[in-house]
Amino acid sequence: METFNFQWHITNRCNLRCHHCYQEKFQDGEREERHLLRVAHLLMEELEKRDLHTVINITGGEPIILGEELFSLLGYLNSHSRVEELMIITNGLLLEKDILFRLGEYQKLTTLKISLEGAHSLTNDAVRGRGVFDKVVDKIRLAEEISSLEVVLMFTLSKKNVKEFSSMLALSRDLGVEGVMIERFIPQGRGKEMEEAVLSREEWRDFIEELIEVCELECTPYDLLPYRAFWIKREGEIEVSGALCNLGEALCLMPEGTIFPCRRFPYPLGNILEDGLEKALDSPFLTTLKDRKHLKGRCSHCQVESCYGCRALSYALFADPYCEDVQCFWEGITP
């Protein structure tokens, strides 16, 4: 059973203004979320036509802000045979008892991914806003107390918080959540204003070495070079899953139907309301991003299998997705 996954940003509206946010606007034009069910129907039709199944991460903006529109969408997706699993990425601030109980009614909704940018209020609130850390921690405790949904902390690494990785693992243990997802900061949208917070290659390697040590992995930093993100699960012994670049294997849907390669890579591939998925799936652009003949610098002759650098980072820093990945610490050694 072949799957093709989506991160679906169902609204631009948000109750926070985080400094690292990939958005530039925080209101939907002419209530773009009115297209939600139409987009959902089109998406399911496209998947049926291609005999594909899907896992969908629903996010925003802040998805919980849509209220009944979100629940209508969840009801439709939960009932559709092409949907294998649903997850919600949220800042957590709007999670109340009644909302958590209603979310628990959808069998295919398994996980709440709740964002924190540090294990302490000083670090987190410098990015997400004053008082946010304590409020979110309270919501996480509420979810753990009354909800059957798994809770995972979302942690975006930058110069501002990279030293708090071990503390974030400790916080996840104290809160009783199922794990921590680690991603790297890409300066898009509002985040362009803090471009100086992008990790250097030395800082990225230091983090990888700490990950290996803390999680007691039997590998070298070079073994982990291809991975763009990590999911550290805490069921019994620590388990680390690495996420390879999913260009061409997943897509990002925006509120107005625009399709991006991923949310950190705002290069329009089409619009599902106008083109279905065909234009995006058949895009020759996606193919060139994994072809070393098109890549530049060290990425053009890299020997690391399954690694093509982070094209989103190159696009954000240089407006050229083919540029060398400046965070790569490969030194010409085949792993």
Image (cartoon, rainbow, N blue to C red):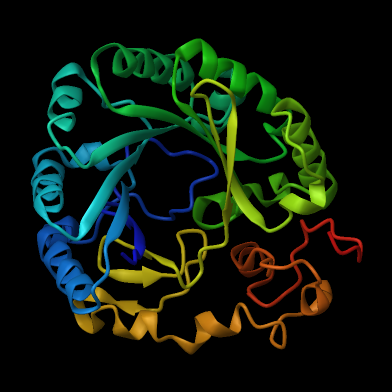
Quarter residue 317 falls in: bottom right
Q: Nearer the viewer, residue 61 or 87?
A: 87
Quarter assignment of residue 331 = bottom right
Count how many numbered circles sit on residues in the image: 0
Report the front residue among 215 and 256: 215
Q: Position of residue 92 (x, y in %)?
A: 34, 28
In the visual, does 122 lie left or right of 109?
A: right
Which quarter of the image is occupied by the C terminus?
bottom right
Q: Kindly identify the residue that appears in the image at 65 percent across and 83 percent down.
A: 291
Provide residue 300's location: percent of width, then percent of height: 78, 79
User: Looking at the image, which residue is at 34% across and 80% down?
Assistant: 270
Q: Residue at x 73, y 35 (%)?
A: 217
**Is 332 drawn above or below residue 23 in the view shown?**
below
* Horizontal relation, residue 123 to residue 172: left or right: right
Is residue 128 found left or right of 123 in the rendered image? Answer: left
Task: Report whether 248 appears left or right of 288.
Answer: left
